Image: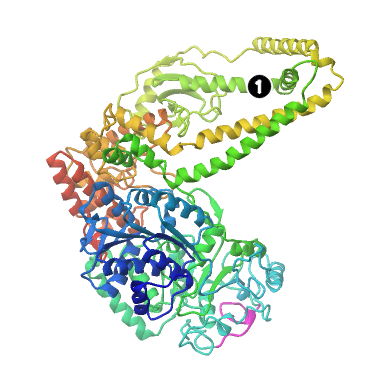
Amino acid sequence: MSTPGPHLAAFTASLGFPLDDFQVQGCLAVEAGQGVLVAAPTGAGKTIVGEFAVHLALATGRKAFYTTPIKALSNQKYHDLVAVHGVDKVGLLTGDSSVNGEAPVVVMTTEVLRNMVYAGSSTLRNLGFVVMDEVHYLADRFRGAVWEEVIIHLPESVQVISLSATVSNAEEFGDWLAEVRGNHAVVVSEHRPVPLWQHMLVGSSLFDLFVDETAEPREDGSTPRVSPDLVQAIRGAEQRRNDDGWVRGSTRDRGRGRDVGRDRGRGPGRGPSGGTGYAGQGHRGGPGGNGGARGSSGRDDRGFVRGGRPGGGATRAEVIAQLDRDGLLPAITFIFSRMGCEAAVGQLLSTDTRLIPQREGERIRRHVEERMGSLAEEDLGILGYFDFVEGLSRGFACHHAGMLPLFREIVEELFTAGRIRAVFATETLALGINMPARTVVLEKLVKFNGEAHVDVTPAEYTQLTGRAGRRGIDIEGHAVVQWSRGLDPIAVGGLASTRTYPLRSSFRPTYNMAVNLVAQVGRQVAREILETSFAQFQADRAVVGLATKVRRNEEALDGYAESMHCHLGDFREYAALRRAIADAEKDGAKKRSASRRAEAAISLENLKVGDVVKVPAGRRSGWAVVVQSARTGKGAPSGPGVVTEDRQFRRLTLTDVPVPVEAATRITVPKHFNPKSPKSRRDLATTMRIAVPHDPPPKAMSAKEAGLEAAQENDRIAHLRTELKAHPCHQCPEREDHARWAERWHRLKRETSGLQRKVEGRTNSVARTFDRICVVLRQLGYLDDDSAVTDRGERLRRLYTERDLLAAECLRRDVWKRLDAPGLAACVSTLVHEPRHEQADPSPRMPNDEVAAAVTEMQRLWSELDDLEGEHGLETTMAPDGGMAWMVHRWASGERLDAVLRGQDMAAGDFVRRCKQIVDLLGQIADAATDTELRRSARKAIDGVRRGVVAADRLD
């Protein structure tokens, strides 16, 4: 290892503790002028390398930007750096706020830096270092592309320090960084400085998951052995289960995991049992016994858990009390439900649980009351303030995205400072700020991903449990999985010991990205730049493997061809005849059915808006009028959209139309028809019923026609047989031997052709998407015929929303021109809002006719874009959603929060977060708009939305 230079020596001396080897390697690379990727487990201390880059920037008179994925993490890092370097040398930039933005060290969200790069901001001058914390966020489906944009477009003179969680393809990511950034080092550490012990909680008994070891990766890749005591305890629990689904608590000491808190992991200042002595009534100060005897309160005289979790087990209050007695607090309990987190706090309050001294609780209460000074007193009830502060004063709280940001910030501060002892959180906390704990508890290993209930992956398990074990405080960290019926300990062991966490690029070009790149470097160079993305890098590497397999297959095909060679004639031709006969005999009926389906699919594609058809099958059978053409591009092919006789909007599929259909008549569909409007659908259905013919539609193929088609197929098979017998190879004595080689050749050829299609699909895939985007932009006038950015394109350059092109089209068509400030805010909310539930309200409440008309026009514009994107095989833009337009209009008009949210299915935290996004987009619209009145309305709308709880965060 190289000798540290003077800057690293000075930095190390200022820390007061020695650096680990991986930290030294990373810092040496930075001091040597290299970029560096540091991949290490959560809590290992990889941010030291980023902090050294900041130190080096100040020591050498250059600037350093420290980027994070979320505002909360930016806020935390800002405070950390201010504490070290002083408030005059550190700034903060997060979307809608700016603190000392020209300081030599600036903390910011990654999107802010991306926007700076595209705008050519003067703030970038003299920039020497960019630290990209949590760089593994580039795998995020919605925001990941921003990280790649920044890495690709930063000047070559800037050293990029990328900090990542442990990923299994760090070397591949490092190779890409070296290719696009030049001189780059990769430092990988899988060692956890605080060992993590894995446990399972069965009933009220805590067992080690593995025998005498943690789940550290083994060199041979094998899985550590699961504790036989744990397996035996689970068998016993299953046997003792009665009809009510309760579990009898064990009163015997089972396994060696009974005294985990007393034997290890206890921090300074703990009591003899490792607990605080504040675990609620009935638990105070008592040293827990072994096995299930601990935590026996809450059980009946037969040993059954009262109020236990479904599937058997201790209550949340019992679990926390037991962890406290075992010295395993502070703990984060992950519950994959916001309601579950809130309920957990309620359950601890109902059992009078207290985890901290009452005097400390009163100090916390006064601190929270001071922080709440900016909130209106009448809003506190709807915000859930009273249970929130009561829980904090007793040492516990919940943490989820539906909470007010200020509430989450207070929880984070108090937990990080060790002032509260238990937090019930959703998985968003694992992706957020630095909140380490001694113990992490997982109530279950199944979560809802927005579409279905799915198992937690090894990567997610690693990320969740990575919070356990505080460096410099804990000897060990602890991960606890609560057992419930059907949970296999062997499967849990495999999950806990797997270290597969590949980083996959989510990069895809956007309209905003395209116009910014074309404006800066021209279309051809922009195309070449996009081909350097990590997404294309990974696709190209996959292509290398596929191409190698294609070459091997082609060599094998040559060998098969030689083996099936026949001296009497072309055996490949003869084999093709045999195969044609076999296919015809075996799949005749199937092929006829497929042919009919193909004809039906073509007939659906040929339907035009206004065509009236008779749907022959399915729940939607009956008359229907086409209001949207079928989409047949590569993006997301789908059938035509129709309004049915019962006034419903549906998309037809081959299930509804298994046979070809033709238009029976045509009617005029209004130009601005909105399929989401019940009134529009009702009027159109009435028009259709009047227009439909009284004669029945043409019948499907008759039995006579079907018989004729079958006879033709038989004639074709007979003709093929004649050809086969007449072929010279038919007389070959080695015919069947040749035929076996021919069949092998055919199967391998089919596989090879499929591989070749994959190669063609992945080669230059990002650039081809960019080309299709440019075609759309040229059609709409954002690029001219020479692919130069037009005035429209310049406006699009300033719009960074996911629905960027739709927002630009609304500006171009003057959709928002005559709206007042609350109306504009309501309309802009439709570009931001994404309902949490799968079923969005198809007819959301609108505040007035002006907003309703503007939203209808936005939906019409979206429909046009949707058709255009489908035509060019692009991923389609999300439709505008008016689900919070009414709420935002009332809020921007000055209504109280309780009046805005009363009766609405939206949490206060979600409302505030969306309002902040609306403020951000309104600011972009104010910059991009050419109409003076619209710019004024946008700024007024910002003031109307950014007030009260929306403006209550300390820094943003």
Write down the residue under mark 1.
Answer: 591
Above or below, 721 relative to 804: above
Above or below, 611 relative to 206: above
Residue 455 percent across, percent down from the top left: 57, 55
Would you identify the image quadrant in which residue 245 lies?
A: bottom right
Q: Would residue 442 be found to the left or right of residue 855 on screen? A: right
Above or below, 52 relative to 65: below
Q: Quadrant of the C terminus?
A: bottom left
Q: Would residue 710 be found to the left or right of residue 277 on screen? A: right
In percent of the image, x 20 and y 53: which residue is there?
122
In percent of the image, x 55 and y 70: which residue is there?
479
**Where does the magenta region start and end?**
287-302
In percent of the image, x 46 and y 84: which residue is there?
278
Magenta segment includes 556: no
Above or below, 662 relative to 183: above
Circle 1 sits in a helix, a strand or a loop, which is it? helix
Would you identify the image quadrant in which residue 635 lies?
A: top left
Q: Nearer the viewer, residue 575 or 322?
A: 575
Magenta region, mostly helix, strand or loop? loop
